[in-house]
Amino acid sequence: MKRKDQIKSLDTLVDLRSIEVDKLQTELARQEATRARYQANLARLTSLAEGSGASGRLAPALALNCGHYKQAVFALADNHRTDLQLHEANMAVSQRNLSTAWARRELLGKVLEQQQDALAREQDRAARKREDEIATQSWLAGRA
């Protein structure tokens, strides 16, 4: 009965580790979506800056306004790049956490499988022993 309790406990631990892996995978997917949004925003900001045209051909007041606009867009793009780099660093940490959790789950899964195999062997051995005892008793009863 002790081995069955161990198996039940291991099975619960494997389930908990699987839930942890699922949560980490979901978090990583959410972070990947955020990264994609950052990259799309950067592409749009670049196109906005390039689409505003050359400011040197405009009247001085418009050229100044266009220059300030481009400067603001480039500053915003730089901030987005910095945020994206920080976000990607967080994603790398999350990926390592996911890898670690997955490895722990797999290790517990292998231990669970070994315990289940050992229990099956014990049960098979006990069943064969009972069958042998019954056969021996039948044989002895037939001799008497």
Image (tube, rainbow, N blue to C red):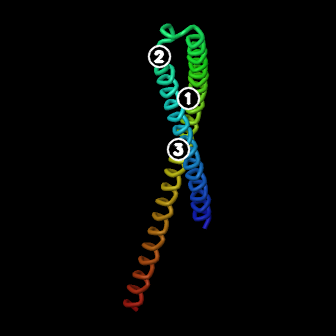
Q: Quadrant of the C terminus?
A: bottom left
Q: Residues within 10 Å of mark 1 (few under 14, many from 20)?
A: some
User: Quarter of the image holding residue 71?
Assistant: top right
Secondary structure of the residue carrying tag 1 is helix
How far is disc 1 from disc 3 in space, using C-alphas? Answer: 21 Å
Q: Amino acid at mark 3?
A: Trp
Disc 1 residue type (three-letter): Glu
Alpha-carbon span between mark 2 and mark 1: 32 Å
- CA separation in Å, label 2 and label 3: 51 Å
Q: Position of residue 140 (x, y in %)?
A: 41, 86
* Near-viewer residue (72 or 79): 72
Q: Amino acid at mark 2?
A: Gly
Q: Find residue 89 and report its image quarter.
A: top right
Residue ID for mark 2: 53
Q: Secondary structure at mark 3?
A: helix
Q: Which residue carries the number 3 mark?
A: 102
Q: Earlier in the sequence, mark 1 or mark 3?
A: 1
Residue 133 percent location from the top left of the image? 45, 78
The residue under label 1 is: 88
Q: Is residue 45 above or below residue 55?
A: below
Depicted 136 relative to depicted 64: above or below: below
Residue nearer the viewer, 54 or 132: 54
Taking 138 as reference, is 100 above or below it?
A: above
Q: Nearer the viewer, residue 133 or 47?
A: 47
Q: Tell me which residue sits at (44%, 84%) in the image.
A: 137
Residue 62 in percent (x, y) is at 57, 14
Q: Report helix, strand or loop for mark 2.
A: loop
Q: Are marks 1 and 3 in contact (CB under 8 Å)?
A: no
